[in-house]
Image (cartoon, helix red, strand yellow):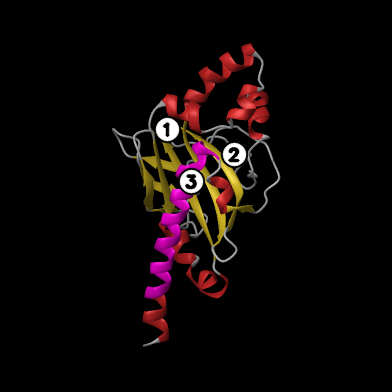
């Protein structure tokens, strides 16, 4: 099954790096009963002594009947100084697939899936239902209007990382290009909302520390 996922991931513009060799690592703490992330693993916080993980509060930036997208509140605040200097911010973006059908429909590249053999497609339809979340670390350049993904990790429905270990090139992509793909428009809306949030955080930070 790892080979099948590897074929699909080749078409994705992200690279799995830090946690890629740690299947079973807790990355999402689901809310009992509905699956919404209660806490998410944060790359922007130091782990408490004696803990293997640091947790942060997720903020919803997109929500519909099949998919919800969240950003890590800690990364949002951590990115404020760099955003003020160059208009670039980094956040952890978490996709929550509300049904197994939406995971199979949205979590992977349709183009890559279409190239699989009939037997592999049947296997994919069974295995993709195990995916509950997708964690991406993304950089957004608001001045140049482009974004890139620097890490991608698939997470099962219990919140543990999955053994999907494929590196692919990460590169800057113009934000308008996202709108060309109907299945990616949720991502564009999430980035737009996240940009609004960090603009507000930056304005608040400037008011507190530059005027007082």
CB of mark 3 within 8 Å of CB of mark 2? no
Q: Which residue is mark 3?
A: 187
Packing grade of label 2 (10 A; few <14, some 14-19, many >=20) is: some
**Percent coordinates x, y for residue 193 in the rendering:** 41, 55
| Callout in the foreground (3, 2) | 3
- Gap in Å between the C-alphas at discs 3 and 2? 26 Å
Up the image or down, 116 lies above or below 144; here it is above
| Callout in the foreground (1, 3) | 3
Packing grade of label 3 (10 A; few <14, some 14-19, many >=20) is: some
Q: Which residues are magenta?
A: 181-204
Rendered image: mark on residue 2 = none
Question: Toward the viewer: 112 or 41?
Answer: 112
**Percent coordinates x, y for residue 167 in the rendering:** 69, 40
Residue 194 lies in the magenta-colored region: yes
Up the image or down, 171 lies above or below 75; here it is above
Q: Which residue is mark 2?
A: 22
Q: Quadrant of the N terminus?
A: top right
CB of mark 1 within 8 Å of CB of mark 3? no
Up the image or down, 8 lies above or below 204; here it is above
Judge left or right: residue 92 versus residue 99.
right
Q: Which residue is mark 1?
A: 158
Lower position in the chain sequence, tag 1 or tag 3:
1
């Amino acid at each position: 099954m790892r080979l099948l996922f590897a074929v699909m991931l080749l078409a994705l513009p992200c690279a799995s790096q830090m946690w890629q060799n740690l299947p079973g690592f807790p990355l999402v703490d689901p809310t009992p009963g509905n699956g919404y992330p209660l806490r998410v693993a944060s790359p922007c916080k130091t782990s408490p002594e004696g803990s293997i993980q640091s947790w942060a509060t997720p903020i919803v930036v997109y929500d519909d009947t099949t998919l919800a997208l969240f950003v890590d509140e800690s990364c949002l605040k951590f990115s404020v100084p760099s955003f003020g200097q160059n208009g670039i911010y980094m956040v952890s973006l978490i996709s929550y697939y509300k049904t197994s059908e939406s995971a199979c429909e949205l979590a992977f590249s349709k183009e890559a899936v279409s190239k699989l053999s009939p037997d592999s497609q049947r296997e994919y339809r069974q295995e993709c239902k195990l995916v509950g979340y997708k964690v991406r670390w993304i950089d957004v350049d608001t001045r140049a209007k482009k974004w890139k993904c620097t890490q991608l990790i698939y997470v099962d429905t219990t919140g543990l990382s999955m053994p999907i270990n494929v590196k692919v090139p990460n590169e800057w992509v113009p934000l308008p290009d996202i709108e060309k793909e109907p299945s990616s428009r949720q991502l564009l809306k999430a980035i737009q909302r996240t940009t609004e949030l960090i603009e507000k955080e930056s304005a608040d930070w400037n008011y507190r520390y530059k005027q007082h």
